[in-house]
Amino acid sequence: MTQVENRPLAATFGPVVGRPIDRVDGTAKTTGAARFSAEYPYADLAHAALVYATVSRARITGIDIAAASAVDGVLSVITHLNAPPMRPPRPVNYMNLSTLASGTSVNYLNTDEVYWNGQPVAVVVAETLDAAQEAARLVSVSYEELPAAVDFAAEEGNATPEKNTPMSSGSAKKGDAEAALAAAPVSVDLRYTTPGHNHNALEPHATTAAWDGDRLVVHEGTQNVAWVRDQLAWRFDVPAAAVRVISPYVGGAFGGKTTIWAGTVLTVLAARVTGRPVRMMLTREGVYRTVGGRTPSTQRVAIGAESDGSMTALIHTSVTQVGRAGGGPEQVTAQSRHLYDAKNILVQQHQVTLDTLPNTFMRAPGESIGTFALEAAVDELAYELEIDPIELRMRNEPERNPIDGKRFAHRALREAYARGAELFGWSARTPQPGSMRDGRWLVGMGVASAYHPAWQLAANVTVRLAADGSVLVRCGFHEMGMGGATAQAQIAADALGVPFEAVTVEYGDSALPTGPGAGGSGQTASVAASLLEACDKLKRSVLALASRSTESPLRGQRLSDVRARDAGLYRTDDARGESYAAILGRAAQVSVDAAVGSDTRLGSIVGQARFLTRFLLENRRWTKAAAGAQFCEVRVDPDTGEVRVSRWLGVFDVGTVINAKTASSQLRGGIVMGIGMALQEESLVDRRTGRIMNANLAEYHVPVHADIPPIDVFYLNEPDPTMPLGLIGIGEVSITGVAAAIANAVHHATGKRVRDLPITLDKLL
Amino acid sequence: MRPFAYVSAPDVATAVRAIASEPRAKFIGGGTNLVDLMREDIEQPDTVVDITGLPLTEVAELPGGGVRIGALVRNSRLAADQVIRRRYPVLSQAVLTGASGQLRNMATVGGNLLQRTRCPYFYDRSAACNKREPASGCDAVGGFTRGHAVLGTSESCIATHPSDMCVALAALDAVVEVESIRGSRRIPLVEFHRLPDATPHVESEIAADELITAVELPPLPLAATSRYRKVRDRASYAFALVSVAAALEVRDGTVNAARLALGGVAPKPWRARMAEEALVGAPATEESFLRAAVAELAPAAAQSENAFKIELAERTIVATLRQLLTEGGAA
């Protein structure tokens, strides 16, 4: 199939928005000029390494640091016996979202308690990395082990129903779904299980920290510079203004760098103790031991339907885990409130608390594993009904949000399926399992829906237009590889009518106006909303400046009367106007500035309140989401059960696409991660010790190139009328539905339903 | 990593003298396994003797029809060798299914023979492992055992041997040549690796002061019709769940000769002699292949998570023999 993603865009979006422009940081990254957090040179830099607990729930009874301290070059071995006090993390408060920032509730090295197997219990600081790592190995810790619950499968029965909070909803219902299910002429009632997953960003978590008196500079690969700043200021009891977090390049994050983990805090502590700048890059094992990942889950999906396929009942319940020392509920049932027009709906999430590493955000938390169960169950129902699985979905496609009747801001799932079926050749599929072959291979085709809500967060932005026509956009947002800075430069270029190359975007620094965290696929829309507002303010200021002169053709014009183009403002009626250079030059002004949002204390409180109000209001009015149709073809070896994905097409409804190139890459990346989730990824937690036994990339499998077929992505490019420029975030939607599409294709190929991820070959023998 | 001394040996005599004088020394070739193990503190040599400068890098045909492979021939070079590809395709294929291109460029034939298991409990110093620390116990039993052995295990160890190359060598009746200050000797590959019994830390017949100098392949005409089939959890860069090295000679519909070895199922490269016996003289049919496979796996004993390997091994044996029958050997 040909690549179809780079089709021309409608001209209404201007000259650069939508175009496949190369990322602005591409050259720096490919030439090695880009400096990541563990690459900042300091003259007297010291290196730190962690010592991890090897038991789950315990009290430390002794630490022998003699051998470690004797290693040449060791500066300090810090344990709970000699560490200076830190303030413990604050409890969560929704008026201060940075309280969400601590990955765990543990006050590292300020306690003798161990909450999970792998918790850091000491940090070694040395002149060299080798010395630090060698000494860390020589620290000997003794424990009094305490009763621990570490086996998710065994503890599942102790799960409790989740309560609703302002930020997440653990349950919802419409009608009486259980009764409707019992009465339904056709039904399925199925149990699905998914394993825990660990983060594996290319760049392991890394921190370089330097104190200067009570001022702190931290180089940290993070998805939220403001949270890191506020959290560190709190923990080390200094003003937030004294902490600067610098994070221009982040080597992948995927949710794993949203909150603050032990390595960050302990690097800052090590710098405090030794009075030296300290660098710590976690080993790959260190990431597994100290950075949370995705919870395992068990899920029940039950659907009742009339014989024509119309759903009368949809039930989706889940059990996930949290850690004794942190983590939160995963919104596994989220998509089941939005995807099908069932008359009766029941969703309910449960959690069980374990003595394991707290879970965290990871690659579309909730919808990744939730769509696996829901979309596999819908496929099973389609077979029960003998209705084509796409047709069944179309018969249940809702006009309004099924759970509460709210309006969809935008919904184009019908179009996505129609376009996908045509491009993929769905009509060539014969529905009987095992009926399609290619030589010795069994061939199967499967579909599933993708769904992810559209989020928008507060963003403070400043824009400066200089007399030479250059534009500087400043916002403390984050670039983990997705092309965020490039997209914002495109947006600013069009909004101000300047060439793309005239725009510089500063980001990834807590000294900048506070941006949104990169998460929930919400960053681009969040920054764009404020950036567009700031550009409008700026153009009004320029108009006001022009109006001072009686000679200006723009005198008396309003913003709606002019168009920004050719590095100036021009009237829409007679095309007369002036360049920015002319206007600023005449006014003898070097630049014009505009700001949205404020980082003063009052400003941030107002901003937070404004954001929450808008968040709640918008949530009440609209259901907003990205969605899509995932099509896949698999080949299964009938002798060995080996599964190979041979073709992929994803058709996405993600509103306006800002950059055709980076958007396509991001959508493809999500599909690759979904393939890993479907076929390979699994954290192996020993049920006796709570220890992750495959804490490395040799044994924790992610896809290699040979596992990935050509991936076609297509987006409908219809703007969402409620979002800035009509864009919907694309960070996460494309991983959703992938595992179900594969499970459905595997069933089509083999007749076997695997309801337990990953779909390894032993489950198909 | 612990500090260690580094010595480079210019010739075999110096190398074996160096190792004889230093009981905690290790030879280092490509280092693709040893360095990993040193980083994890599993191997703790106080000296490494670098042997990559030794003149053991040739693949040479021998007058009697065999082939001699120098111990320091890199895996990539071995796999690409035209003689190997033509006369012993199973060996070339096996090497190419292992590791990654970068690792194969470094890894040597001798080092590949001495690869250590990938059992996660062996690799984790907080777990009990009789192989790492004799008589400390085995945490693999009752733990994650999906990758573990079903043949040749003992109460003390259920780990698998990870090599692909050795599985092909086992099928080919290869002979390992070793040298020490006491002289040189030859060990058949199938006897080179040991089953764990009560001493899983002793993994091969080679003494601590012996250097592998070469591997010799006998003249074996049926090896021209041979294949290696590796079944694993992803398409590349994963250890075998089950692998099969097979060579087959069929005359008039009857199996005249067969060589069969298995990987991923035992603590050593597993020569499948029972299956070979069942095959020779039997009609070359799917039924005979299955009977032979079942005979080989009859003594298999599974752990909690690896019972599937028994059926998978049987199916993979049948599939590989079927392919040899219908498509011939690997190109």
Image (spheres, coloured by chain):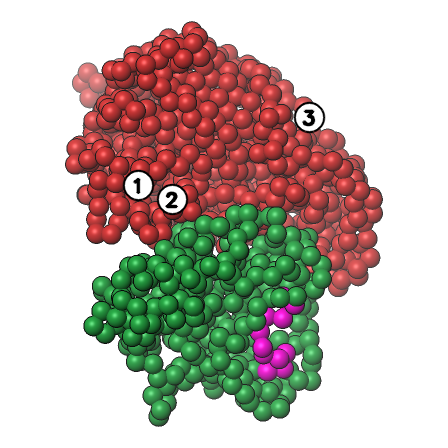
- The kind of residue on which mark 1 rests is Thr
Q: Tell me the chain of label 1.
A: A
The span shown in magenta is: B199-210
Residue type (three-letter) at the residue carrying disc 2: Leu
Disc 3 from disc 1: Cα separation: 52 Å
First-in-chain label (1 vs 2):
1
The local secondary structure at tag 1 comes to helix
- Residue indicated by mark 1: A750
Q: Which chain wears green?
A: B
Secondary structure mostly seen in the magenta stretch: loop
- Residues at discs 1 and 2 in contact (Cβ within 8 Å): yes
User: Which residue in the structure is indicated by mark 3?
Assistant: A90
> Which residue is rendered at x = 71% and y = 59% of the image?
B136
Observer-nearest residue: A536 or B127? B127
Camera-side mark, 2 or 3:
2
Q: Residue drawn at (79%, 48%), measured in percent from left and top?
A: A142
Q: Nearer the viewer, residue A274 or A131?
A: A131
Colour assignment, chain A: red
Quarter of the image for the N terminus of chain A: give it: top left
Disc sitting over residue A762 in the figure: none
Q: Residue furthest top?
A: A175
**To which residue does mark 2 refer?**
A764
